[in-house]
Image: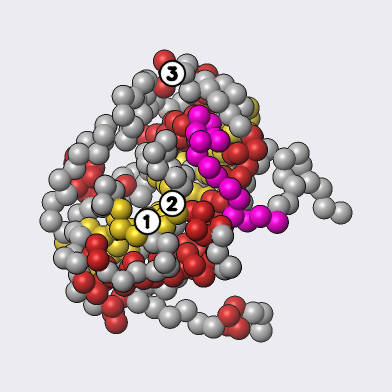
Amino acid sequence: MTVRRSGTAATSDSWPALPYEAWGDTCQTLHLWSQIVGKVRTAQTPWTNHSWHVVLYVTPRGLTTGPIPHGQRSFQIDLDLLDHEGRISTSDGAQEVIRLGPRSVASFYGDLMGRLAMVDCPVVIHPLPNEVEDPVPFDQDLAHASYDAAAVHRFCVALNSVHRVFTEFRARFLGKCSPVHFFWGSFDLAVTRFSGRIAPAHPGGVPNLPDWITREAYSHEVSSCGFWPGNESVPPLFYAYAYPTPEGFDGAPVGPADAFFHEELGEYVLPYDAIRSAASPEETLMEFLQSTYEAAADLGGWDRDALEFTPPPETARRPR
C-alpha cells in the first residue's frame, strides 16, 4: 500500500503556472531562507572551483545541501517544499525539524542556528544576503515573512521538471561541465559547460558579491543556461549566455520561435510560459538549450568534436 503524506498528492501538471505576481512575496522569503541554508554549507565546505561548493541540489521534495562536514561528523539540511519542513539530519542519527510557513527571515534564521547548535553542529555565517539590492541582515529581517504553501509546491514541481531536462542536456557533453545545481545567491537552477580555455578577467559588479568570487567563477570560457523564477519586472524564464560573449552571439539563429536576445540582461531568454504551452515542453526546452550552446560554441571557436558526447541508446539502460 502506498501512503501519501499531507501535501504530496500527485499532479498531472509537471509544468505548473508560476506567475511571479501571485507568489512574489513568498518567492522573496524562500530566496532568503535558501541563502541562510546555503551560507551554512559555504561556511563548512572546502572551496571548490567556480563556487560549486556553495550550491544546493534539487530533490524530489525540494532542495538539499547534501552532506556538510563538521569535525568528525557530517550533517545535511533539506528544504521539503511538499510537506513544508526544514530538516537537519546528522551522520550519527540526530534530527531536528523546522516549520516552513508564514514566518520572518529573522525567525527562520534564529530557529535554524539554534537547532544546529542543539545537534552539536554550531555554524557561524556572514548574516548579510548576497546578490540582492539593499540587503538586510538575516537576524533583523522582519519584512519578508510570506509563505504560500501551494505556490511553493508548484515551484518544487517545476524545479524537478527543469532538472530532468537539464540533466539530459548535461549528459551530452564530454568536456568539463558543472552539475545541475541551484545557486541560492541568484535563486536559479543552472548547468554550465566549459571550452577548456582561460577567459579574460570578468568585470565583476554583482550586487553584494566580492568581485574576486565572480572572477574565479568565470576564470574559464563558459556556455551557461538556467531557470529563474523572475522578479517584479521579469517573468519566469530560461536563460542562456556565453562568457566571454563571442561576436555575433546576439544575432545567432536560436530556437524555438519564442526565444530572443534580451538586451538588458545580455543573454538569450525563453519565457517559462512558452514551455508550458508547447506541445512537447521537454523537446522545446532542449531546442533552446542546444541551439544557444551551438551558437556560443560555433561563434567562440570551441572544439566541439572533442567536447561533445553521444550517450548510448535507451536500450543500453535496460537490465540484461
Lower position in the chain sequence, tag 3 or tag 2: 3
- Please name the residue that numbered disc 1 is placed on: 269
With 252 as the anchor, is 150 left or right in this view? Answer: right
Instruction: Check contact, mark 2 vs mark 1: CB within 8 A.
Output: yes
Q: Residue furthest right?
A: 1
The residue lying at 19 percent from left, 42 percent from top is: 204
Marks 3 and 2 sit apart, C-alpha to C-alpha, by: 28 Å
Quadrant containing the C terminus in the rendered view: bottom right
Q: Amino acid at mark 3?
A: Asp
Q: How many marks?
A: 3
Front residue of this view, candidates 113 and 59:
59
Whether residue 114 is visible: no
- Please name the residue that numbered disc 3 is placed on: 141
Q: Amino acid at mark 2?
A: Leu
Indicate the position of residue 165 as horizontal and vertical percent values.
51, 64
Tag nearer the camera, 3 or 2: 2
- Please name the residue that numbered disc 2 is placed on: 237
Q: Residue furthest front?
A: 257
